[in-house]
Image: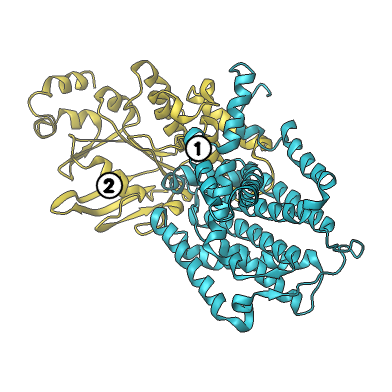
Amino acid sequence: MTTDGSPFLERHRLRPLEAAWWLMALAFFFAFPEYLAVATSVLVMALFALSLDLLLGFAGVVSLGHAVSFGIGAYVSALINLAGWHEALTGALVGGAASGLFALAIGPLILRLTGLPFIMVTLGIGAIIYEAANKAVWLTGGDNGLPGVTLDPLFGIFHWSVFGQTGYLYVLGWLLVLFYLCRRIVSSPFGMTLQGVRENPERMRLIGAPVLRHLVTGYAIASMIAGIAGALSAQTNAFVGLEVLSLNTSIDGLVMLVLGGVGRLYGGLIGAPVYMFVQHFAQQQWNPYYWMFLIGGLLIVIVRFSRGGLLGLLDDLLRRVRGGVP
Amino acid sequence: MNEPALEAKGLHKSFGALKVTDDVTLRLDAGSRTALIGPNGAGKTTLVGLLSGTTRPDGGCIALHGRDITRAALAFRVKQGLVRTFQVSSLFAKLTVLENIFLAVSENEGASGDLWRPAGRRRNLIGQAEGIMERLHLTNSRHRRVSEIPYGEQRLLEIALALALEPKVLLLDEPAAGIPTDEVGVLFDAVASLPPQIAILMIEHDMHVVRQFASEVYVLVHGRVLTVGPPAEVMASPEVRAVYLGTSGQSRFAGGAQGA
């Protein structure tokens, strides 16, 4: 810590502990080549939870319909792929752009609401989009989904192997870039402004802030990132199914974020692997049907004992080790 | 330039059957130092709410520098230079003192749309915020969260946020309420050091302060303007004494009027 000790003046600086996460993600690539496919989906969900953190942790917006953004990105990127555009990076970008535009369209309408009405509206929109996708079989394949997403070699060089090496590093690369983007945003004056809106929107208006415009901007960015996550899911699974739009996806992202810790950016990056590891472990070693029992218990324990999720516990631990001096 | 900085005509506001603001007409010229006094429940805070836009009037109109703002959005009024403070502090509780002031400075300087450059490297914005902190003696608490600082400091921070917006018309709702007596000077020094061309309206109970600060006093009773005039004149008025203070306050009031 420097003399200042202010989170706000220091937020843009990289701390040594952070490097550990990225090094571990890289080490995983070499240590567990047989698990890369499942690890790739962990990274996708980490990215999804990261986008939710921007919304929930910084702007204070609680959405139960974030899967809509994920799903739009997934379907749009799959559709342009099936229409003949096989380049991966631009495919993911188009998926993200579609989700961002969706947020720009509905944001000004729904972000006027707060609290329970807003949560219910996001739930409603999620249900409507899900059923619309279910009905529009000609476009989405309905229950059967859209199989057959195929990609050109990445940068024209790296082929997409069945073992998922390219896919893992590809998603990790996206995660790094978008994480850096989020980090810049939350340490910028705009990021501070979002936190002001989270704390006291009425007072923000009284310092002259166009609150709705700031919220729509934040929502559009979060939605775009969720859309890219959805596109990555479509690309690395070579398939999109209806579950990308389901309430379960929204809830999964939320639970991962809360497990890891809200408002820290790393919450999703910690929560997603923990959640999916517990899920995998419980399903295979314990009971394939009742694994949510374990997740539920974990969630209650974490929320009960730490307001900051697993990262909050880590903070407390580090503080204790250093003898109470932060 | 004899156009008023802020002008309200025929303002009305009722909550149910209760008329809280009843045909209030008020004028603040550039550079005016105006006090708004009146007994509890006279509708002073409601009037500041109507002028600042936090409360919608039932009737009447408000003009800022000659421009009708009766229906204008809150943020627009602020951007045009109309700023208020609250009697009970309304701040960003989980953010630090510096972050609170930074929010106001950044919005005022048009930096709040910047998504890229770190706030911690915006030396000019931080410098401005630090200058305001110094003026209100908040520097020692700069990195403490608002929820952790004493109430008196929260009150000063409330004023700091208003000053950070570089207002042209400043509405202060009992700024000294809740500030320990020995720190009140900090507040009034900061108000006194504001550029002379700013128009200031202050709700204040302390007659010594009113006499020192104001060149004009509005007396509000039951939502109506009872009288307007220079402090000495208003305080000498038997009508004001009778209605505003009742018999019990007469002596205190007379004390304040002495030497005026």
Q: Amino acid at mark 2?
A: Leu
Compared across the picture, whether B200 is left or right of A196 comes to left
Residue A173 in view (yes/no): no
- The tint of chain B in the picture is yellow
Q: Residue at x 71, y 52 (%)?
A: A43
Identify the chain of the residue marked 2, using the numbered disc in the image: B
Q: Are marks 1 and 2 on the same chain?
A: no
Compared across the picture, whether A173 is left or right of B52 comes to right
Q: Secondary structure at mark 1?
A: helix
Residue B26's tag is 2
Q: Are marks 1 and 2 in contact (CB under 8 Å)?
A: no
Compared across the picture, whether A46 is left or right of A208 comes to right
Q: Residue at x 13, y 53 (%)?
A: B17
Residue B115, placed above or below residue B213: below
Pick the residue in front: A240 or A91. Answer: A240
Quarter of the figure with the N terminus of chain A: top right
Q: Residue at x 33, y 34 (%)?
A: B88
Q: Which residue is mark 1?
A: A301
Label 1, residues with CA under 10 Å away: few <14, some 14-19, many ≥20: few
Q: Secondary structure at mark 2?
A: strand
Q: Position of residue A129 (x, y in %)?
A: 53, 71
In the figure, the cyan chain has which letter?
A: A
Residue A229, placed above or below residue B22: below
Q: Amino acid at mark 1?
A: Val
Q: CA distance from mark 1 to mark 2?
A: 59 Å
Q: Position of residue B241 (x, y in %)?
A: 12, 30
